[in-house]
Image (cartoon, coloured by chain):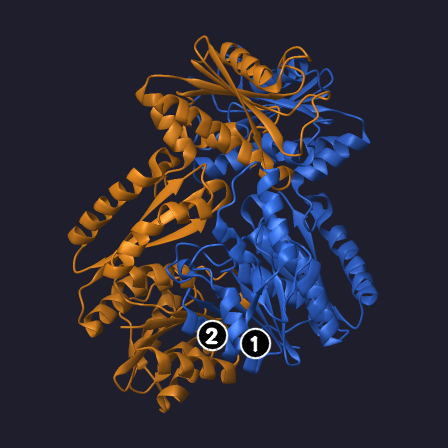
Chain colours: A orange, B blue
Amino acid sequence: MRCEVVAIGTELLLGTVVDTNSSWIGEQLALAGIDSLYQVKVGDNFGRMEATIRAALERSDAVICCGGLGPTQDDITRDVIAKVMGVEMRRDETIAAEIRRRFEVRGRTMSANNLRQADIPIGASPIAQMPGTAPGLVCPVGNKVIYAVPGVPREMKEMMLGTVVPDLSRRSGQSSVIRSRTLRTWGLSESGIDEMLTERMAELDKVGNPTIAFNASGIEGIKVRVTAKCDDVETATRILDAEEAKIRAILTDAVFSIDDQSMELTVLNMLQKRGLTVAAAEPYSGGILASRMTAIDTEMATFKGATVSHDVLATGAGGVAGEVRAGNVAASIRELHKADVGLAAIAPGASDAQPPGTVYLGLAIGANKHGERVVLPGNRAMMREYAVINLLNFLRKTLAG
Amino acid sequence: MRCEVVAIGTELLLGTVVDTNSSWIGEQLALAGIDSLYQVKVGDNFGRMEATIRAALERSDAVICCGGLGPTQDDITRDVIAKVMGVEMRRDETIAAEIRRRFEVRGRTMSANNLRQADIPIGASPIAQMPGTAPGLVCPVGNKVIYAVPGVPREMKEMMLGTVVPDLSRRSGQSSVIRSRTLRTWGLSESGIDEMLTERMAELDKVGNPTIAFNASGIEGIKVRVTAKCDDVETATRILDAEEAKIRAILTDAVFSIDDQSMELTVLNMLQKRGLTVAAAEPYSGGILASRMTAIDTEMATFKGATVSHDVLATGAGGVAGEVRAGNVAASIRELHKADVGLAAIAPGASDAQPPGTVYLGLAIGANKHGERVVLPGNRAMMREYAVINLLNFLRKTLAG
């Protein structure tokens, strides 16, 4: 069963509005085990919409058209679908009455063009869910089908979950589900992970299920996504559990979490389990670490605080190595904020000639101080972000080790 | 001149990653006066990528392929383009050397598969900008052209602005340009702005050029976008200048900046002009203000520092009104960081019963202290963001007034 998504609207092509609808629909289709091989954006133009829908219908079993169902002149999705179906339009009096009623309920005057939304292709049936004034449509074309849903995300989602996905599942006659799990790593390169997993991927290639894909996500690290296609959720979960264990055994402590769990959440959880509090000196990272930590630990129970300053923090004597200075700053911030653990990211001193992107990371736990030198890629904004995640990873590995 | 965008990556179809690249590219093309009539997402599949690129090349003059240029097995954009061009691949030794150099600089071992990125179709030329390890490509096909840019947004953008858009403009040989200017406001509602500008918009409707549109952008404020389509940049600029002056006269000091100029940049510029430095207490906003300010003022010449803490900062006696306490905290942070201006955002004390979202903003300039109470909408994450922009706007209006 293949289903394409056609997102309709000139504003999508102009970039005024980002098409997040297709992504959400793609995710729902994947979860239902339905393949979505193409997704197209096209403007509010009759000829191009028609060509796009025809091409989609030729190579797929179903097409979801999203947008262009409103009351204005440029909302022509209904008309284009009628052309593709080879039928005329008819006024649906039930829809017309419902549209009139909604305006009455809200005490608003209905302009005549709103009734355009009640004109639907002959043979099409309205979708039962109608959260707005734009009705959705199920439009059979031979043994294939075109769905029309509004571009307003809330309305689209209600119709997708209430009608479109169940209808697609019924048509496909299949009960297979697709589930994914993402293992998140830090400290390895994408190509390094690729090489470490080559053998395992070759094994999986023979079986075809689950599959593995990589995604380099900048400061979110490199993600290893395992996807299983199975008859039921239980089997999919079992396969993902087994594969996660295999990959963890290969990548070991480079894996810091799964799915949506960020590095800062991982570290906060580790600290909390050990009953430790933490504070940070951010003369280099300028408050990024603090804003991340306090976004999760809103009460500041584990993250006790941060200081952003070049002057308030004593960075130690000039002649001392950068790693040692970073450790000293970490120790002093720990004391200032009365925390168990101190973190620091500092730039090299004026007399310390280093390549661009050099940052010293400092970590103080109790009386112990550690320093580490890293060279970070990108521009200044990226370096700040990379400094923060490297600093958190430094703490994570120290706590785990 | 027509240019299509093909976004490549199975993760885009599955909805794991939202394709924001196509939207951004669409916006750049529109600004350059180049039509983009279709944008397609396709997975990492040779046959489907080939079919998509061929179809795009047939109906357009240029195709921008975004993604699939990495070092791993599933990155096959280069190979597919070679097939479409009808040529073999060659190893580009200049690119290979550059990739090796980048790994060396960062002290990391390069795995062999990274050199796949140096294999390019014969006849293609590398794009000069190379912010990552994936080179972009310009691939002539008869009198048409395929561009390949990486899926990493930062890398894609640098190549688009540095090479692809200028090359497209040169090829199109056309002179009509679209230019926009966005006036950014804080403190008015969207419907309020709509009403204030009703008369002016009615006047513009008659002429048709320039046009005005609104965009409510959360913590970025409400944006008023003026768009002019003209034969040349000079005329467009003149029209935009005149319209900006008209709108500023209507909206007065609600306009805090234009285009990409953020509230924090506006405030930093005002402080710098007056020779003032600033520091912030962020027990409520958790470092967000500091991270914003230091992103611009990287040397911390004007922004002297911030402290994120519930304990280190004395918030004053319990019986004092929230506005007074906020002013006191602002004064003490000013002294702690030896700045001319102190800023503070604090939550109501335990005994101070207030509706959810209540935050006290404090401002200290020299010996003067001010406090302000605001009630912010949304969830906790949004409230933190709103607190920061309200605090900066408080300072902006005080400095201007």
Residue closer to the observer: B15 or A99: B15
- Nearest-to-viewer mark from 1 and 2: 1
Q: Tell me if A332 is positioned left or right of A87 in this view.
A: right
Chain letter of the residue carrying label 2: B
Residue closer to the observer: A354 or A168: A354
Q: Which residue is mark 1?
A: B85
Q: Is residue B285 visible?
A: no
Q: Quadrant of the C terminus of chain A?
A: top left
At x 83%, y 64%, the residue is: B234
Q: Position of residue A32 (x, y in %)?
A: 25, 62
What crowding class fits label 1: few (fewer than 14 Cα within 10 Å), some (14-19), or many (20 or more)?
many
At x 48%, y 62%, the residue is: A19
> Secondary structure under badge 1?
helix
Q: Which residue is mark 2?
A: B50
Q: Position of residue A112 (x, y in %)?
A: 46, 78
Q: Position of residue A132 (x, y in %)?
A: 37, 65
Chain letter of the residue carrying label 1: B
Q: Amino acid at mark 1?
A: Met
The quadrant holding residue B118 is bottom right
The residues tagged by marks 1 and 2 sit, at their Cα atoms, a distance apart of: 10 Å
- Is residue B341 shown above or below B36? above
Q: Quadrant of the N terminus of chain A?
A: bottom left
Residue closer to the observer: B102 or B41: B102
Q: Tell me if B46 is positioned left or right of A202 in this view.
A: right
What crowding class fits label 2: few (fewer than 14 Cα within 10 Å), some (14-19), or many (20 or more)?
some
The tag earlier along the polypeptide, 1 or 2, is 2
> Secondary structure under badge 2?
helix
Q: Amino acid at mark 2?
A: Glu
- Is residue A241 shown above or below A204? above
